[in-house]
Amino acid sequence: MAAKRKMNQKFDFTKRTATGKGVCRKIRSKNALPVVLYGPDFKEGLAGTVDAKAISVIANSPFHETTVVTLVMEDGS
């Protein structure tokens, strides 16, 4: 079995306030993906969007399980 290569990728994360099925469909129609970020600083979740084309590169790569993703937010964090 071949060793898996580790990749690092950065994506622009745009915060959004609107949620729901209709809103998410509109986001997808604009070639973006609705995402929710969870973690120690975001217990309730932080809704946002990322570029669908950029994510598809990782999702369709053989290294999708070992890729580290860094989200760059509008405020620089």
Image: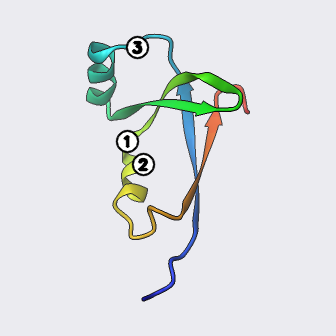
Badge 2 amino acid: Ile
Q: Residue 59, position in %: x, y?
A: 38, 56
Badge 3 amino acid: Thr
Q: Quadrant of residue 11?
A: top right
Q: Residue at x 45, y 87 (%)?
A: 2
Marks 3 and 1, Cα distance to the nearest angstrom? 18 Å
Q: Give me the disc on residue 22.
A: none
Q: Give me the disc on residue 19.
A: 3
1 relative to 66 in the view: left or right: left
Marks 2 and 3, Cα distance to the nearest angstrom? 21 Å
Q: Residue at x 43, y 49 (%)?
A: 54
Q: Quadrant of the C terminus?
A: top right
Mark 2 crowdedness (10 Å alpha carbons): few <14, some 14-19, many ≥20: some
Q: Residue at x 39, y 70 (%)?
A: 62
Q: Secondary structure at mark 3?
A: loop
25 relative to 4 in the view: left or right: left
- Asked if the residue under mark 3 is in contact with the one under mark 2, i.e. CB atoms within 8 Å, the reply is no
Q: Secondary structure at mark 1?
A: helix
Q: Give me the disc on residue 55.
A: 2
Which-is-in-front pick, marks 2 and 3? 3
21 or 56, nearer to the observer:
21
- Asked if the residue under mark 1 is in contact with the one under mark 2, i.e. CB atoms within 8 Å, the reply is yes
Q: Residue at x 34, y 61 (%)?
A: 60
29 relative to 10 in the view: left or right: left
Residue beneath disc 1:
52
Mark before the other along the chain sequence, 2 or 3? 3
Q: Quadrant of the N terminus?
A: bottom left
Q: Residue 19, position in %: x, y?
A: 40, 13
Mark 1 crowdedness (10 Å alpha carbons): few <14, some 14-19, many ≥20: some
Mark 3 crowdedness (10 Å alpha carbons): few <14, some 14-19, many ≥20: few
35 or 75, nearer to the observer:
35
The number of callouts visible is 3
